[in-house]
């Protein structure tokens, strides 16, 4: 079943009636993204994000296949990891390029520890995943050089811009990907023409700047998709993108209005490393 905002109430009903899918893996039995994204290993809160984040359509657009070597860059709280690592488990290879334990940021260290605990707590799903540390410019090897078929990152570019390290991150992707490898980027989309101050403070980034960073690293732009577009998001919020769900940084202030907007408007961009 294709999951959309219209079909989501039916999905919730089915889940409530016990018709949900068990994300049990048996050697050679390849589960689909549709099955994994509503599996028992996922919380109700994470499943509720599916209609906004369109994992099936997004991963199809990027061309992900279960026998690939995949790097997820910046998995943070593991929303996408819960889908990607089980999908790659039996026939491919999953690398999660997370924060470094050497980070001076206590938040980043705690985030990494929580991610590692999640991975080790469910070896049936995550036992074959490999965690790497990415902390430019000191820790850059997120996979063996030119070994990966695909690198994906979801809603992270703004963080790298805030740190002034966006070029170093894209250079790390480039080094890890095979010639011909694919880089997929999903990011909160700023209005065209927005300046660097907006991108350093709001969490929104222009498509033009993401393409500029990728191009500077050596990537070729392949195509874009409107899968994760939200035309109801005007982007100019008091607390930036974090004003919207799921963060609701303003608390109860205008919460219904921001809930009605939904998650942010997002670009979905596909790049390629030149070569075979």
Image (tube, rainbow, N blue to C red):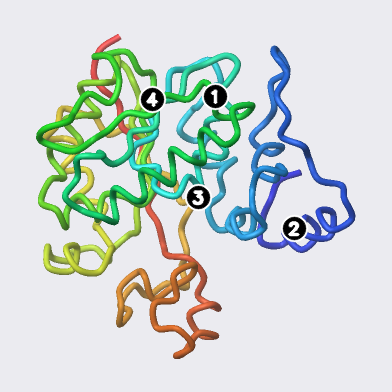
User: How packed is label 3: few (under 14 Cα within 10 Å), some, or many (20 or more)?
Assistant: some
Q: Please report the residue visible at 25 percent of the width from the left and 69 percent of the height from the top.
A: 202
- Camera-side mark, 1 or 2: 1
Q: Residue at x 19, y 40 (%)?
A: 102
Residue bearing mark 1:
127
* x and y, in percent, of residue 8 in the image: 72, 59
**Residue occupying the point 53% across, 77% down:** 259
Residue pointed to by mark 3: 227
Q: Are marks 2 and 3 in contact (CB under 8 Å)?
A: no
Question: Which comes before the other along the chain, label 1 or label 2?
Answer: 2
- Of discs 4 and 2, which sits in the foreground? 4
User: Does 56 sit above or below residue 9?
Assistant: above
Vertical arrangement, residue 219 with respect to residue 143, above or below: below
For the residues labelled 1 and 2, the Cα–Cα distance comes to 33 Å
Closest to the camera, between mark 4 and mark 1, is: 1
Mark 1–mark 3 Cα distance, whole angstroms, equals: 31 Å
* Distance CA(mark 3)–CA(mark 4): 19 Å
**Residues at marks 4 and 2 touching, judged by CB atoms closer than 8 Å:** no
N-terminal of the pair, mark 3 or mark 4, is: 4
Mark 2 — residue?
7
**Residue 117 horizontal/vertical position (percent):** 48, 40
Is residue 115 in view? yes
Where residue 64 sits in the image (x, y, percent)? 50, 27
Image position of 133 with respect to 93: above or below: below
Q: Is residue 179 visible?
A: no
Give the residue at mark 4: 150
First in sequence, mark 1 or 3: give its number.
Answer: 1
Helix, strand or loop at mark 1: loop
Tally of numbered discs: 4
């Amino acid at each position: 079943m294709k999951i959309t905002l219209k079909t989501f109430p039916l999905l919730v009903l089915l889940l409530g009636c016990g018709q949900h899918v068990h994300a049990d893996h048996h050697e050679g039995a390849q589960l689909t993204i549709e099955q994994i994204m509503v599996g028992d290993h996922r919380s109700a809160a994470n499943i509720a994000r599916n209609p906004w984040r369109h994992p099936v359509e997004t991963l199809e657009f990027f061309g992900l296949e279960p026998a690939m070597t995949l790097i997820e860059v910046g998995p943070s709280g593991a929303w996408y990891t819960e889908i990607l690592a089980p999908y790659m488990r039996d026939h491919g290879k999953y690398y999660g390029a997370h924060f470094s334990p050497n980070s001076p940021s206590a938040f980043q260290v705690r985030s990494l520890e929580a991610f590692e605990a999640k991975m080790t707590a469910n070896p049936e799903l995550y036992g074959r995943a490999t965690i790497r540390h990415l902390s430019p410019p000191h820790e850059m090897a997120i996979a063996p050089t030119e070994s990966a078929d695909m690198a994906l990152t979801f809603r992270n570019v703004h963080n790298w811009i805030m740190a002034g390290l966006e070029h170093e991150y894209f250079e790390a992707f480039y080094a890890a990907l095979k010639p011909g490898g694919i880089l997929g980027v999903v990011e909160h989309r700023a209005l065209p023409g927005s300046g660097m101050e907006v991108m350093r403070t709001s969490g929104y980034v222009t498509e033009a700047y993401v393409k500029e960073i990728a191009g500077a690293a050596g990537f070729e732009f392949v195509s874009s998709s409107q899968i994760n577009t939200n035309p109801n998001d005007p982007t100019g919020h008091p607390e930036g993108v974090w004003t919207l769900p799921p963060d609701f940084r303003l608390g109860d202030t205008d919460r219904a209005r921001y809930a009605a907007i939904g998650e942010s408007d997002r670009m979905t961009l596909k790049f390629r490393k030149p070569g075979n």
